[in-house]
Amino acid sequence: MPIQPEYNILLVEDDPGHVTLINRAFETEAHCRLVTTTSLAQAKSLINHTPPDLVITDIRLPDGQGTELLAPTTGFPTIVMTGHGDEKVAVNAMKSGAAEYIVKTRESLASLPRTANRVMRE
């Protein structure tokens, strides 16, 4: 079951290469509107203006931790990504309300639409 039409997804990622890969992955997802920002401050501003249906965020951002955007404080599901797999960080992110935690690889970034679909169904 795909994500419902016109879901707004906020991508918070400061690595241009990862942004490119994620944008490519979502190209065929016509029912998703992917908005990208590169900082925590920009993400918070966008969230205050137009709350997304889903957030996909890197943990380490230039101005803070993506975990500040987790569901207990924002009310929407959040997928947390990292380029550095760390079991302790993953456990803490999940305990803090992350809907999913992924280590960034070409494969995991390419499968983000499937992960987003699953998270939105749950």
Image (cartoon, rainbow, N blue to C red):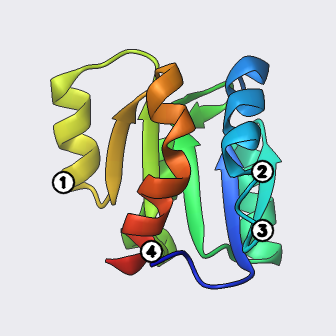
Q: Spatial distance from mark 1 to mark 2, Cα to Cα?
A: 31 Å
- Mark 4 highlights which residue? 120
Label 1, secondary structure: give it.
helix
Return the residue at label 3.
30
Query: In the displayed structure, does residue 65 sit left or right of residue 121?
Result: right
Quadrant of the frame with the N terminus: bottom left
CB under 8 Å between discs 4 and 2: no
Q: Amino acid at mark 1?
A: Lys
Dot 3 surroundings within 10 Å: few (below 14), some, or many (20 or more)? Answer: few
Report the Cα–Cα distance between label 4 and label 2. 18 Å
Q: What is the CA distance from the residue labelled 3 to the residue labelled 2? A: 7 Å
Q: Earlier in the sequence, mark 1 or mark 3?
A: 3
- Name the residue rendered at 23%, 51% in the picture: 94
Identity of the residue drawn at 39% across and 67% down: 119
Closer to the eye: label 4 or 1: 4
- Residue corresponding to mark 1: 95
The residue that disc 2 covers is: 27
**Between marks 1 and 3, how big is the CA–CA gap?**
32 Å
Residue 100: percent from left, percent from top: 33, 52
Kind of residue at badge 3 = Ala
Q: Position of residue 3 (x, y in %)?
A: 55, 76
**Residue lying at 69% horizontally and 58% vertically, measured from the top left:** 10
Front position in the image: 5 or 12 = 5
First reached walking from the N terminus: tag 4 or tag 2: 2
Lower sequence index among marks 4 and 1: 1
